[in-house]
């Protein structure tokens, strides 16, 4: 049995940062990540200095379990290069309060040097009555039993009373003391529905500290949601009241309005250090890079006015503010852009630069690749450097993630030709390589070039799906910038065993993204990625596979059919 | 002299909503709006039920003054249709503490039924020493003098001690009592740099209530910024401590990380009514529509995880949450989507529907148009209805704003033809009508279709500018949806009198947006709009106007030149 850290609340001025981007963050509709993407994010989190990475919910699916295992074994054994701490992060997995979930969670994390199992069971009357359909006594018994069950194999156990913010305090105290007696080392207090105000959440933590026997020997933790826009303030109020772990996500992604933002809590503690007198292990200069990575991987753009990491967070527009800034920087600025890494690093690599220079830069940025992947990224880097004077870190990130095509073996874009304009006759010819190696061609017209491309792909790959969202953003400035396209689609058919196991009652939303200086080419690639993701994750079935009505394009398509009348 | 309302703090349970989207919100880099757009937003705010509309800063430029006047006269005289209140909103203008600014502010608002002048002067030592270069005594004297000066013409005076959050409390109390003695009826307390925590901001308001003579006869107001992610919690803490006006913006836009979000404060007060015991005059069912309008007009997308108005704010992704929601809605939801108008209304108008039906819908949505504008929107509506089965409110909004082309008299897109694809030979041919009525044609190649289009436009209109941002988002779901393109550009030359007056030390950032089912066509229109805006606002000068090297296209261009070698 491995031993985990047991550090009591408030004996030190250190606040643990528990990042749940890969678990609660991934629950944002359409944020589903591949295992490769999760590993990239986990590596970035480890470099950033987070104390605990919640890597997933292994009981949800075999894919989730595999991703947690990979993170525990590849990021949780020794510190990645650049990590500010000498220890690797704790890798944690979520489990409902039942043996099967706990077994799977342990299977996920046991390969790490510092494994943690995180068990949750709701304690509000609303959840117990309507969702769990359990009595208070049954809930207390289950908590004790399951924490003890997990403790047999894992020293580091976290327990969360779901919906604590709306729980009867006396019952909550009893539930928490049972968890401590059974071996929990961290007690996490979730405001599951984002309902509380800072004074209330601070009082909740204070009440727990005052009334739960043994609480002085465990770490109290906050887990806040942003439904009323108060997640950060609630988290800080909890910390001020004695919590020493904050559960957060990069960019505040998560269910509904999302979780507390890592970057806001960390920078509030840093900026208001005299007030809080607390520190974290985060290297704040990596915040903007981590934010950008999560944005790229999930396809959720960071709004320009996002605190700390938004592109305007340090911009001063009005004349009065600009005048003030020139006279004294502190008039309108409480943080320096450099402190969060908000200054854009531009590679001085150009088209004459070599593979070694790119490899070195990728390593500095926290990527670990095999040679084949570096070759592909290098080829794309050279192509871009031919067209642009300088290549920014953001460009490289877009290339890397564009390369990390999941499920390449399914459908791949081999060629695309588009004509469009004000004549209203947008036409796209698409050439795809199918899983069987054959190449197929189809031409379609559409209401615009993107519609035409997607129609042509739909004609070749008959997967029932619905386009929910299409967006493009330029990766950097300049008219020759890369355009990064994100599509989100809903798979309409194919309720399979896995989705039944996950109790998914609506069809899943999945995304695809791709970058290219030609946004129509990027659109085609992004749509194919979403489609491949749907097919590969088993969320849908191809209705009829690739239609064979078209000639294999090893013979060029003689007559491209028009798919719309 | 007109009389304004003077309502003391905390004699009622009513919190005034003071919206500064058009003033502080417009200070977001690249959010500059035209007068027409400002009027649309003001009308939507009036319908929404806001008590005070801060319409602008008239001293900044003649355009700002004209926009404030138009809003006072057209939205501030009688209640717009659909407004929940029997009174029109107070229309307010910002002024620095000098006679010239106050005169211009009065000129802006005097046409309204309920005018207000809002004077600000900083009270923190940092701002007084470094920015104002005034002594404490000078600042006190100036406050008294300028509030009294404004009071001669306007009964309703608001005073803001800028950077109150970092001011010496004793000095702040003295400054505020001077303002009251001189006639201020609202005291607004800004946390200008977003530095405070809720306990501190609540204590600041509490301290003012306890120590400022005469405070019981005025309204205390909050003005918070979101630099550390705590604007909403700070605002609520201020209200809890006795403030009865909240200064907010739609979607929380504003300088840097932005202002407090109107929608979050309003929904927190509504959702937590038993705690606060307070009400606002806002019709919450209009929140999503107002959010979408401001997003369209400013080109700032609302992030999906934005509290209250984000597209995922009411989405439940995980199986556990979905299961809970099915068993009891309150398990994971504290607000109903209907309560904020988050359910998409789809017009049952199709291609057989008439002009009257569209006009009625536009009126319900808060738009007031002349016949010419309705004709243009109707033509575009019909064209869209031909292509889509149903037309959503969001589509109509995109059409309306696409029609509201500012400065059409400058350059207009007459035709566009694009070819692109994986062959890497993206080519665009652009046909523009210039201000002199002549039509010009140019063909360019680019790294992608958007680059090619922008290169061709640049070749025809030689305005020195730099593309900062390019983004596209689909207006609704479906592959045939309208794509709304936003570009943001920086005008590189032409420091003119106006920008000098505004003390603008960096070149201004301006945006353009346009919607079309063909995103390349929309891109061309959006780029032209930004360019026209730059030219019309005098922020730049055309280097050489339209190049005449191309044949007027009344004669079709015989040989389209290629602009890149």
Image: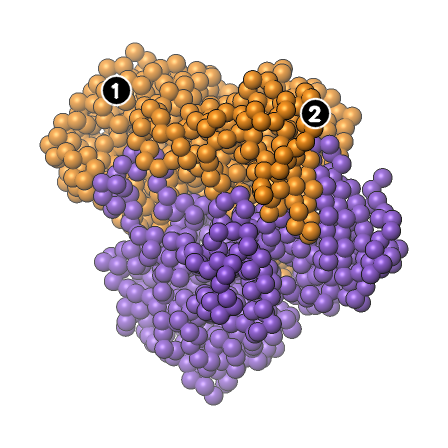
Chain colours: A purple, B orange
Query: Quadrant where the C terminus of chain B lies?
Result: top right
Cα–Cα span, label 2 and label 1: 54 Å
Percent coordinates x, y for residue A62 in the rendering: 65, 73
Output the chain of dot 2. B
Relative depth, front residue between A553 and B200: A553
Percent coordinates x, y for residue A415 in the rendering: 73, 54
The residue under the point 39% across, 71% down is A82
Residue farthest to the bottom, as pictured: A1
Q: Does the image show residue B398?
A: no
The residue under the point 28% across, 64% down is A278
Percent coordinates x, y for residue A230 in the rendering: 41, 50
The residue under the point 68% across, 31% down is B559
Q: Residues within 10 Å of mark 2 (few under 14, many from 20)?
A: few
Q: What kind of element bears circle 2?
A: loop
Whether residue B520 sits left or right of residue A395 in the image: it is right
Residue identifier under label 2: B556
Relative depth, front residue between B559 and B489: B559
Q: What kind of element bears circle 1?
A: helix
Relative depth, front residue between B447 and A45: B447
Quarter where residue B357 is shown: top right
Q: Is residue A52 above or below residue B445?
A: below
Percent coordinates x, y for residue B516 in the rendering: 65, 35
The residue under the point 37% across, 20% down is B62
Whether residue B177 sits left or right of residue A62 in the image: it is left
Residue identifier under label 1: B100
Query: Quadrant where the N terminus of chain B lies?
Result: top left
Q: Is residue B175 above or below residue B409?
A: below
Output the chain of dot 1. B
Residue B273 is tagged as none
Q: Earlier in the sequence, mark 2 or mark 1?
A: 1
């Amino acid at each position: 049995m491995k031993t985990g850290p047991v550090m009591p609340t408030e004996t030190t001025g250190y606040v643990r940062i528990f990042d749940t981007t890969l678990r609660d963050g991934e629950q944002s509709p359409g944020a589903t990540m591949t295992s490769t993407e999760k590993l990239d994010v986990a590596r970035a989190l480890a470099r950033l200095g987070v104390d605990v990475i919640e890597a997933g919910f292994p009981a949800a699916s075999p894919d989730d379990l595999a991703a947690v295992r990979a993170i525990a074994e590849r990021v949780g054994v020794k510190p990645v290069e650049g990590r500010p701490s000498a220890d690797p992060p704790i890798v944690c997995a979520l489990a409902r309060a039942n043996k099967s979930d706990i077994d799977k969670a342990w299977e996920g994390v046991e390969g790490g040097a510092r494994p943690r199992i995180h068990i949750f069971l709701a304690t509000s009357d609303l959840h117990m009555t309507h969702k769990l359909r359990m009595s208070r006594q049954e809930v207390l018994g289950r908590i004790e039993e399951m924490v003890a069950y997990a403790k047999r194999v894992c020293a580091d156990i976290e327990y969360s009373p779901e919906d604590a913010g709306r729980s009867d305090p006396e019952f909550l105290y009893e539930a928490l003391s049972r968890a401590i007696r059974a071996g929990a080392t961290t007690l996490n207090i979730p405001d599951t529905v984002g309902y509380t105000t800072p004074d209330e959440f601070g009082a909740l933590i204070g009440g727990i500290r005052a009334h739960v026997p043994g609480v002085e020997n465990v770490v109290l933790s906050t887990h806040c949601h942003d439904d009323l826009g108060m997640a950060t303030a609630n988290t800080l109020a909890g910390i001020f009241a004695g919590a020493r772990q904050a559960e957060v996500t990069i960019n505040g992604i998560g269910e509904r309005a999302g979780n507390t933002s890592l970057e806001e809590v960390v920078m509030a503690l840093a900026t208001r250090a005299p007030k809080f007198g607390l520190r974290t292990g985060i290297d704040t200069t990596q915040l903007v890079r981590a934010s950008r990575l999560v944005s790229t991987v999930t396809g959720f753009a960071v709004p320009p006015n996002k605190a700390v990491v938004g592109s305007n967070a340090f911009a001063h527009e009005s004349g009065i503010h600009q005048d003030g800034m020139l006279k004294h920087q502190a008039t309108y600025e409480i943080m320096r852009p450099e402190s969060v890494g908000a200054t854009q690093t531009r590679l001085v690599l150009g088209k004459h630069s070599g593979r070694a220079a790119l490899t070195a830069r990728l390593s500095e940025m926290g990527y670990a690749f095999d040679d084949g992947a570096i070759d592909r990224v290098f080829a794309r880097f050279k192509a871009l450097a031919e067209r642009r004077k300088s290549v920014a870190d953001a460009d490289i990130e877009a290339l890397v993630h564009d390369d990390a095509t999941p499920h390449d073996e399914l459908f791949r874009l081999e060629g695309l030709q588009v004509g469009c304009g004000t004549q209203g006759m947008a036409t796209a010819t698409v050439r795809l390589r199918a899983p069987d190696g054959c190449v197929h061609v189809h031409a379609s017209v559409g209401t615009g070039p993107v519609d035409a491309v997607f129609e042509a792909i739909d004609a070749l790959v008959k997967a029932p799906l619905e386009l929910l969202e299409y967006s493009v953003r330029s990766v950097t400035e300049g008219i020759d910038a890369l355009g990064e396209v994100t599509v989100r689609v809903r798979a309409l058919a194919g309720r399979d065993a896995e989705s039944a196991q996950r109790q998914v009652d609506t069809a899943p939303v999945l995304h695809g993204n791709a970058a290219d200086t030609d946004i129509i080419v990027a659109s085609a690639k992004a749509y194919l990625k979403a489609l491949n993701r749907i097919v590969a994750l088993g969320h849908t079935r191809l209705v009829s596979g690739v239609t064979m009505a078209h000639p294999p394009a090893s013979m060029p398509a003689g007559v491209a059919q028009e798919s719309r009348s």
